[in-house]
Each structure stands twice: as structure tokens, then as C-alpha cells.
Image (cartoon, rainbow, N blue to C red):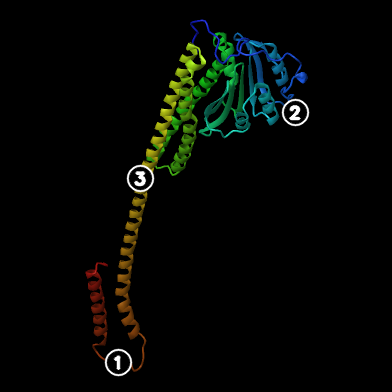
Amino acid sequence: MPQRPIRRAARPSAWRRGPSAAPPRDPRPEPERAGAAPAEPAGIASVVEAALYRDGVRVSSPGSLAETYRELREQPAGMAWIGLARPTEGELQSLAAEFDLHPLAVEDAKEAHQRPKLERYGDTLFVVLRAARYLDAPEEIDFAELHVFVGPDFVLTVRHGAAPDLSAVRRRMEETPELLRLGPEAVLYAILDAVVDGYAPVVAGVQNDIDEIETEVFRGDPEVSRRIYELSREMVEFQRATRPLVGMLHGLMAGFSKYGTDEELQRYLRDVADHVTHTSERVDGFRQALTEILTVNATLVTQQQNAEMRALAEAGFEQNEEIKRISSWAAILFAPTLVGTIYGMNFRDMPELDWPLGYPFAIGLMGVICVSLYLIFKRRGWL
């Protein structure tokens, strides 16, 4: 989505917790605070990037969660944006203790396989998104899960997968300080916008796949049924990723007045909702098209099988006719062979050996038998 300039001065967001909205954090060192967040767990951290912002400008880039907590407490009007990739349970517990995250939301964020949803726990929003990207080489869709915690002065992103590229989202926001100045809800908008914009290449890739499948169906490709089935399954997953977003964004827009969302940001979020609705409709259309293509393919396969069965039947009929002809001629030739064989045995007392008409009689007998058999087979259609 192209960046649009903010045409008026931004007012404080209702989600932002300034000095007048909430008491400042306890300035005492962390060990002295009751109920302080646990120290950052040992081992390799899953923090991709952490930054503190004030008035839309990055003021610090802490190197650890503990440092981020400390600097945010020192800047009550600031905002922390922490990006994590597959964090450990210890890191999530540390974040939960520091930012008072609801245990149910933290439990959901530990693993993927959550449905897209938007839930509010007090002054914190928990958003689950399903990002998607199209892989050209295998011609398939790769889905990834993204969890976002949005509070009065913080944004936490937890990625379970490669998409989306949140570093690009961060760069875009930092290059637009007038938008970033609107606070955590502006960051949520940018993330939603990136996820929804990421659906466009997927839609284009799927459209190209469907065009290829239609060609393969009428070309009689034997592998097209498997490809239709696999793409249909991907469309089910794609539909599960996009359809809930429509309701989520409408629910978010319903709270504009209650939570005092900036008017310009409202326009941006409505634009994202329009894009989501369009994408969801395209996905529904893809599923319907694939169902129809599968029906057409089944019909064509049935027709092809019927044609093959008919060809086999015709070949079998022709083969039977040939067998009949061969059998008929074999029977006709067998008759004189039989007579000749009998008369050729040369027995001394064999009848008709001394009969002057014996030879003409034998030849006539052979002719009569052969003609009779020929007429019989001809009448029956064997010859």
C-alpha cells in the first residue's frame, strides 16, 4: 500500500499511556521492585530487533530485553517495539511479567497453529495473523503465523515463520515519523497492511496456477487431478487466513470512537479492510473455480475411459470375428484331411479298395463335406 502523508497534526492515541494516563514506572532498580519481570533468560536470545521511539523517532536500540525494559521505564512517553522470532518460554514469561500480558494470550503465543483472531485483554490487544507468500519454484503457498501484542506503550511481535518481512515494516514506519507518532495502533496498522499486501502475489500466483490447470485438464494431463486437489487444500488454508480478517478489522473499526483512534489512521484501517474483503472474495472465487474444474476433469476422465472401453470392446469384437473365420476354415480343411487320412491307412481288408468308383466317391465325399460346412458357417456369419 502506498504511503500517504498525514495532512493534520496527530493527536495522542487512546492506547498510548502518557504521564497523565497512567502512573510512571517505578524508577527503582529492578531487583528492588516487587513483582519485577524476571531477568532475561540465559542462552541465545530470540529478539530480532528492539527499539524505543519517542514522537515517531527512534531514540534507542537496546541490545537485550532487560535493557529495553529499563530504558522504557526511564521514558514514560516513549514506545517500545520488540520483534521476536520463535521466542523461548522464558522470554515470553519475561515479557508477560514486564508488560502485564494475559496468561491465555501468552499461552497462545508459545506455539503456532492458532486461528486468526483479535482479542482485547484490558488495555492490551492480542492479534493473531496468518501471513502467506507464494513460492515460485515448487508452485505452492507457504503460510506463517504472526502474533502481535499491542499495549499503551509497546508493540510485541512474535513470528512463527519467515513471512512477513517486519524489518521492511519497521523501515517504512521509521521513514514516516508522522505516522509512527500515532503510537502502537499505527504500528498495528502497518503490520496488518504488510500482511494483507503480502496476499497480492499469492493471489496472482494462484490465478496463474488455475490458468495452467485449465490447460492441462483439456490436454488430458494424467497428473492434473493431484494438482487440483493440492491447490484446493491450499485454498482452504488461504481462506482460513483471510476470511477471519474481515471480521477482525470490522471489530477494530467498531471501537474507533470508544478508544479515540486517530481519524487519519481510521482511513488507513478502512483501506486495509477493503483490501482484505477483496482478497477474501478472490479466494472464495478460486475455491469455486477449482471445484468446477475438478468436476469438468472428472467428466473428461469418464469420457476418456468410456472411449477406451469402447475401443477395447471393438477390438475384442474384431478379434472374435477373426477367430471365427480361422475356426471355420480349419473345420472345412479338416474334413478332407480326415477322409484322406482314413483312406490312406492302406489296410488289406479295407472296404472299397477294389471298387472302381472308390476314388471318385472319396473325392466327392470330401467336396460335399467342405461345401456343406462352408454353407453352414456362411449362414451363421462366421465367413
- Asked if marks 2 and 3 touch (Cβ < 8 Å), the reply is no
- Residue type at mark 1 is Pro
Disc 1 or disc 2, which is closer to the eye?
Answer: 2
Image quadrant containing the C terminus: bottom left
Q: Earlier in the sequence, mark 1 or mark 2?
A: 2
Residue at coordinates 54% horizontally, 31% vertically from top-left? 143
Q: For residue 79, which quarter of the picture?
A: top right
Q: Which residue does the numbered mark 2 point to in the structure image?
A: 43
Q: Nearer the viewer, mark 1 or mark 3?
A: 3
Give the Cα distance between marks 1 and 3. Answer: 73 Å
Q: Nearer the viewer, mark 2 or mark 3?
A: 2
Alpha-carbon neighbours of circle 3 within 10 Å: few (<14), some, or many (≥20)? few
* Amino acid type indicated by mark 2: Gly
Disc 1 designates what residue? 351
The residue labelled by disc 3 is 299
Rendered view: 186 above or below 211: above
Q: How far apart are marks 1 and 2 (CA)?
A: 117 Å
Secondary structure under tag 1 reads: loop
- The x and y percentages for residue 184 are 58, 16
